[in-house]
Amino acid sequence: MRKILCVLSALCWLSVPALSQSYPDRPITMIVPYAAGGPTDTVARIVSEKMGRELGQRVIVENVAGAGGTLGSARAARSEPNGYTLLLNHIGMSTAPTLYPGSTDPLTAFEFIGLVADVPMTIVARRSFPSNTLQELVEYAVKQGDKVSYAHAGAGTASHICGMLFAAETGAQPLTIPYKGTGPAMIDLLGGQVDFMCDQTTNTTNQIQAGEIRAYAVTAAHRIPALPNVPSVNEAGLGKMELSIWHGIYTPKGTPQEVRRRLTSALQAALADTAVLERFRQLSALAVSREEATPEGLKSKLTAETARWKKVLAVETQK
Ligand code: ASP
């Protein structure tokens, strides 16, 4: 169809490069497929601000939440491939093909801009939760069964797969409560309406430091500087729960190469910015290297992770 239109219009030979040269001449939307105020939203807001300054146009975050991030991803995939709609999503891009058959295939529906950051997770509970250590939490959760509630952001999200690993390692079967993101889940955890969750440090660090919630472990090999009193899952005897949440930026398939190149270089500039790095450091997010903040870096991560989670989820969903 496009070819036919091009034959009819001599101008079409000029239009793509011309478009790319003036890009961007209006604000850009960055879709975050989870609720506002949550961990992915936080990463997006930190990066988008600096990317916008680099590009000379605002990058506005839009939260399109639901169905474990697949609604927002589908919206992004369907939008015009002109560089004015981006998607920032995390590890959920690699679990979705297994858990939501027939949903947008991330490997074929998008162009890749680059990886962004890796973020560890924390096992946390409401302040009045009656366990002092991870061991006590495990014992309590196993004993209480579905009288204990676990919040997550929908099937395939970081909080969901972390809870799944927790259940696999400990045998606990808490009542699971899905939210449209861990932003709203955190509000309920703070309010004591839900008992515990496993969530990224980008959403839990401030509340842990303020003593508003309890923290039992961080899903990293070692303790992390921002939370020196929180043991690693290794130390606490749950080493198989080591989990780091990677993030990437995508555009719809067909976005012109020159536009993608500009976006990748804006991302790389954001990840070299001292203010961005300082915000990341405070929340224990680790910016990726310049080599990983590339289309190839993101594509190879997504390919490997999609294969990895297909295997893990095949086992876990059979149980
Ligand atoms: N990324 C989700 C959010 O931003 C949380 C999750 O994946 O667990 O709310």
Image: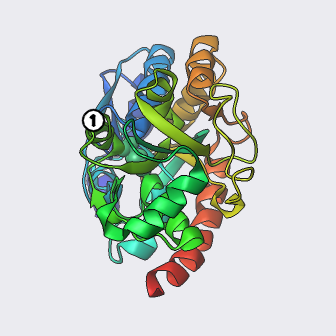
Front one among 69 and 317: 317
Q: Is residue 1 left or right of residue 135?
A: left
Asked whether residue 73 appears in the rendered view, the answer is yes
Could you tell me which residue is drawn at 66 percent across and 55 percent down? 242
Counting other residues with Cα less than 10 Å from the Cα at mark 1, is it few (<14), some (14-19), or many (20 or more)?
A: few
Outermost residue on the bottom side: it is: 318
Q: Residue 3, position in %: x, y?
A: 35, 61
Front one among 55 and 169: 169
Q: Residue 186, position in %: x, y?
A: 33, 38
In this picture, is 197 found above or below 192? Answer: below
Could you tell me which residue is drawn at 32 percent across and 68 percent down? 146
Could you tell me which residue is drawn at 58 percent across and 12 percent down? 275
Q: Residue 143, position in %: x, y?
A: 43, 68
Could you tell me which residue is drawn at 52 percent across and 39 percent down? 215
Image quadrant holding the N terminus, namely bottom left
- Residue type (three-letter) at the residue carrying disc 1: Ile
Q: Quadrant of residue 56?
A: top left
According to the picture, the residue beneath numbered tag 1 turns out to be 187
